[in-house]
Every structure is written in C-alpha cells, then in structure tokens.
Image (cartoon, coloured by chain):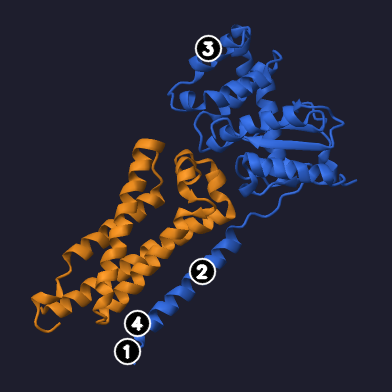
Chain colours: A orange, B blue
Amino acid sequence: MSGSRTRVIFYTVAAVISLAGLADATYLTVMYLTGETAVCGGSASCFQVLGSAYARIGEIPVAGLGALAYFGAFSLATFAAFGYARMRMFFALIVCAMFATTLWLLYVQAFVLHAFCRYCLFSAAVTFLLAGIAVAVPPSHQTPDS
Amino acid sequence: MKRYLPFIIVVVVALVTLTSGTILYRAKRPSVLTIPKSALAPGSGAAESMHIRGPASAPVTLEEFGDFQCPPCGKLSDPINQLEREYRPRLRVIFRHFPLPIHAHAREAALASEAAGLQGRFWEMHDLLYREQSVWSEAGDVGPLFNSYAGMLRLNVDRFKKDMESEQVEEHVASDQKRGAALGVGTTPTVFLNDRALAPTNLNPTGLRAAIDAAMKTPPHT
C-alpha cells in the first residue's frame, strides 16, 4: 500500500474517532448547561469530577473547550485525508495539545479529586487513540507520491 | 467537487453537532417544579414529621429534598445553614428525606436522623451525617458508626437503636418521599423556594443567595 493511501486511511480513521470524542464532549457540555452536573443524579464520582472547579474555567465548561478541540481535530483530519498537506501539521499540533490536557485532567482525577468520571475516561481514550494515529501516520517525505 | 467535499463534510458535521446539542439541551432542560397552593402549608398527616428551622411567619420558605449520601446535598448543607442564620427570621428552612435507591446507606441515614429527631436532635444528626458523609458512605455496615454518632450527640443509644427500627421513623421517611414524588422530585438535592423549585444551576451558595434575595422581593402567591 502506498504511503499516500495509508495516510488517507489514518486520517479518515482519526476523523471518525474525533467524531466519537465530539459526541462525548457535546453531551458533557449539554449536561453542564442544563445544570445536570450540579446534581449528577446523586452519583458521587460524577459530581466529584464534573461538579468540581476543575470542570470549568471561569464560566466556560472544560467539556465545551473539548468539543471545540475535537471539532478542530475532526476538521483538520478531514482536510488532511483529502490531501491538504499543511493540515497534517496543525492536526499533530492540536492532538499534542489535547494529549497534554488529557494527561493533566487524568492527574487531577487520580490525585486531586480521587474520582473518575466515565465520560472523561472515554474522552481520554479517544485522545490517546488520536495521539497514536498522529505518531503512526507515515511522514510525507518517505513516499515519492506525496 | 472533490475540492469542496472536505468543506461540505466539516460544515455538515458542525450543523449536526449544533442541532443535536440543541435537541439534547431541550430534552434535558429540567422542567420547573412547583408546589400547588394546597400543598404549600405543612401537611397534617399523622406520619409527617416536619424538620423546620426558622419561624412559620418567614416570608421565604426553603424546602429541601435531600439524601444524606448524595455529595451535592452534602456540599449544599453548610451554605443552607449559613443562609438560614444570616436571613433569620425572614427565612424558614424545611428538610425532607428523599433517599435515592442508588445510595446503599441513604435510607439508613434518613432513619438515623429521624431516630435522633425523636430525642430532639434531628438537626444535630443531620449536620453530623453530612459532615461525616465521606466516612460512613464507604463503610460496609453503617450501624456501629451511626450508633457512635448517636453517642457523640449524647442520645440514649439503646433507644436510638430501637427507634431506628420503629415503624414511626419509617413512616416519617416514607411520608417525605411520598410528598417529593407527588411534587415531581426525581433527584437530590431539589430545593423549593416558596412554591418554585430552583434550577440545578442555582444550587450553589451564590445562586441560592440570589434566589432568596429575589424571593424576598417577590410578594408570596396567595
């Protein structure tokens, strides 16, 4: 399989995975806006994480920023899959930022809040997959057809 | 066409996300619960046990449906106590039990508070249960812990143990749950100010204070 084709597959997969993250982050944003995270149906771990000060920056929910990041990753991966070469670098950069943020949020859940929210763990898994793809995607200089 | 396809895909995904987010928001937006006029006054059922702080003449009544094992309720407990002290005698606070089935010990905690109430120490047990929530919530058997709390509050522990198993305290808790269910309460904490439930987004010290201030300025519905 040519490097170009492999890249298309990688970026297409990345776009699809980003959609899963986008759905998750959108759901959490809606929960925040409706106030559901303020009560969390009585769930302790949900409230401890999503009701904490770490779940928002000022009045902006972190999940909302996550939705924007996933949408950005999706858009860049889509453009990269269609051969927009410059978008690959931006895709790698945004995934790098998301990866760093995810590590921070996992640290907060594990060592500060001592509670995990499953939606946040799902989001972390999605970001790790995207990071894996960003690392694994073949660089363009290896293939003559790029 | 292929040149424009990524733009079309991105725009379609953006529109689908915004539309589905809006639909979800509308579906999840909590409906405003209200207490009918006939149910505003304290009930007079034999099983009912009202736990009230503040005078009956207070212009604003805060009625909370709480669960001792629910973390948001625990977090709200101190602010409500503080507001009650601050606004006295213009604010009356009523606590109602609404133990959620997802909490293993919530019902026992409600019974413990009622048993303490039979010895005149409901609010002391209420505060203690919330303060120690993280301790007893994780315990396998809460009985010995609750007995020790009863001892700390200088209750007659033998009577406390007996009362916890009595029909009377069961009925008090059931009566509160029945009232909550009739009003449409589904989760905790649900807080009514006079006849209107507060939105979950207002269930924090700032939101509560603002809502109480607004209720003070609004003439009560008659």
Within 10 angstroms of label 3, few (less than 14), some, or many (20 or more) residues?
Answer: some
In the rendered image, which quarter contains the N terminus of chain B?
Answer: bottom left
How far apart marks 3 and 1 lie (CA) works out to 73 Å
Residue A111 image position (x, y, % from top left): 35, 36
Q: Are marks 2 and 3 on the same chain?
A: yes
How far apart marks 3 and 4 lie (CA) works out to 66 Å
Q: Nearer the viewer, residue A107 or B42?
A: A107
Is residue A110 in view from this perspective? yes
Residue type highlighted by circle 2: Ser
Choose top left, top right, bottom left or bottom right for residue B37: top right
Residue type highlighted by circle 3: Ser
Q: Earlier in the sequence, mark 2 or mark 4?
A: 4
SS category of the residue bearing label 1? loop
Chain letter for mark 4, please.
B
Q: Which residue is mark 2?
A: B20
Residue type highlighted by circle 1: Arg
Q: Nearer the viewer, residue B200 or A71?
A: A71
Choose top left, top right, bottom left or bottom right for residue A115: top left
SS category of the residue bearing label 3? helix
Instruction: Say whether marks 4 and 1 touch (CB < 8 Å).
Output: no
Q: Which mark is residue B148?
A: 3
Q: Nearer the viewer, residue B32 or A108?
A: A108
SS category of the residue bearing label 2? helix
Q: Which residue is mark 1?
A: B3
